[in-house]
Image (cartoon, helix red, strand yellow):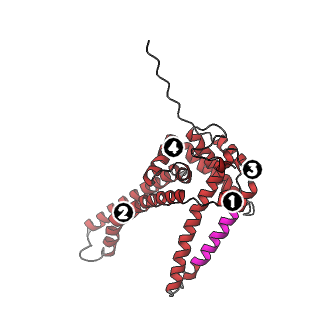
Amino acid sequence: MAPTPAARPATPRLDIGDAVHDGWRAFCRSPRDFVLFALLLWGLQILCQLVQSRIGTSEALSSQPSDWILALLGLTAGVVVSLWGSLGMVRGALSALAGGRPSLALLCRWEGGAMSRLVLATLLLGTIVGGSLLAIVVVVGGPLALLLQFKETAIGSGGAATLLAIFLSLVLVLLLGLWLIGLIYFNVNQQFLAQIALREGLGPWATLQRGRQLADPQWPLLLLLMIVEGLLGVLGVLACFVGFFVAWPVVVCVATAAYQQLLGLPEGGAAPSLSPADAG
C-alpha cells in the first residue's frame, strides 16, 4: 500500500485577543526601556522639526539657501529616525516575545542591512502609491483643469465641452476612490514591513510580496487589528499624552505578536534569525 501523503499544515489564523495579550506581556518584560526609547525618538523628531522650521512658514518663507539646505537635512534625518525607531521597536518586541528583556542598547542598535532593506521597500511602496496618484492627476486631472480653464472661450464653449468636463470629473472621482481603496489595502497588508525587513532579509519587491502573502488571506482580521491598535494609540494620547509613550511600544509589540502568529510560531517562539544575543 502506498504511503498516505502528509497533510498540508493549516494556514495560521490570526487571533487578535492573543496578539493583544502577548504584545502587552512582551511590553511588560521591559517597560522602562521601551518608554525611554519612545521618549528618545520623540525628542529626536522634535529636533528634526525645529531644523525644518528654518525655512519659515507659508506666509513668510526664508530666502536663504542655507535654511533650505538645513530643512532638507532635517527632513531626511526625520525619516531616518522614524525608520530606525521602527526597527528598534520591532527588535525589542521580537526579543521580548522570545522571552528576553530588551535593553535600551538593544533597541538603539543600528543594523545597516535591515535599514537599507526597509528604506528600499518603503521607497518602492511610496513610488507605487504616489506614482499611481500622480498618474491619475496628470492623465485625468490635467485635461480636466485645462478644459475648465478654457471653458468660456470659443474653443472650450459648447455642450460637447460641458459633457466632456462632466465625464472627466466622474472619471477623476472614480479613480480617486479606487486609489483610496488601494491605499487602505496597502496600509493593511504592508503593516509588517519593518518586521519582514528586520528578520527575513528579502529584497524590496520580495518584501512587499511577502507582506501580501502574510496579510491577504486574513485581510479583514488585520484591518480589525489596525483599528484596535489605533484605539490603543488614541487612549494613550488621551491619558494626558504621557500614555502615548506606553501605547506606542505596546502597539508595536501587538503587531509583532500578530506577525509571529501568521508565521505559525508557537507562543514565545522566536522569529526567524533571532539570535541569542537579541533575546537578551
Q: Earlier in the sequence, mark 3 or mark 1?
A: 3
Please identify the quarter of the rendering in which residue 2 is found: top left
Label 1 element class:
helix
**Residue named by callout 4:** 214
Query: Where residue 211 sits: x, y (%)?
Result: 49, 48
- Residue depicted at x 46% and y 22%: 5
Query: Where residue 102 sits: x, y (%)?
Result: 70, 53
Say which amino acid is labelled 1: Ala
- Residue depicted at x 40% and y 62%: 131
Magenta residues span 38-52
How would you classify the magenta stretch by its main secondary structure? helix
- Residue depicted at x 63% and y 45%: 257
For disc 1, the neighbor class at 10 Å (few under 14, some 14 to 19, many from 20) is few
For disc 4, the neighbor class at 10 Å (few under 14, some 14 to 19, many from 20) is some
Say which amino acid is labelled 2: Ala
Q: CA distance from mark 3 to mark 1?
A: 17 Å
- In the rendered structure, the answer to whether residue 230 lies left or right of residue 174 reads right
**Residue named by callout 2:** 135
The disc at residue 28 is 3
For disc 3, the neighbor class at 10 Å (few under 14, some 14 to 19, many from 20) is some
For disc 2, the neighbor class at 10 Å (few under 14, some 14 to 19, many from 20) is few
Residue 210 visible in the displayed image: yes
**Residue named by callout 1:** 105
Q: Earlier in the sequence, mark 1 or mark 4?
A: 1
Q: Nearer the viewer, residue 270 or 125?
A: 270
Q: Could you tell me if the residues under marks 1 and 4 are in contact, i.e. CB atoms within 8 Å?
A: no
Quadrant showing the N terminus: top left
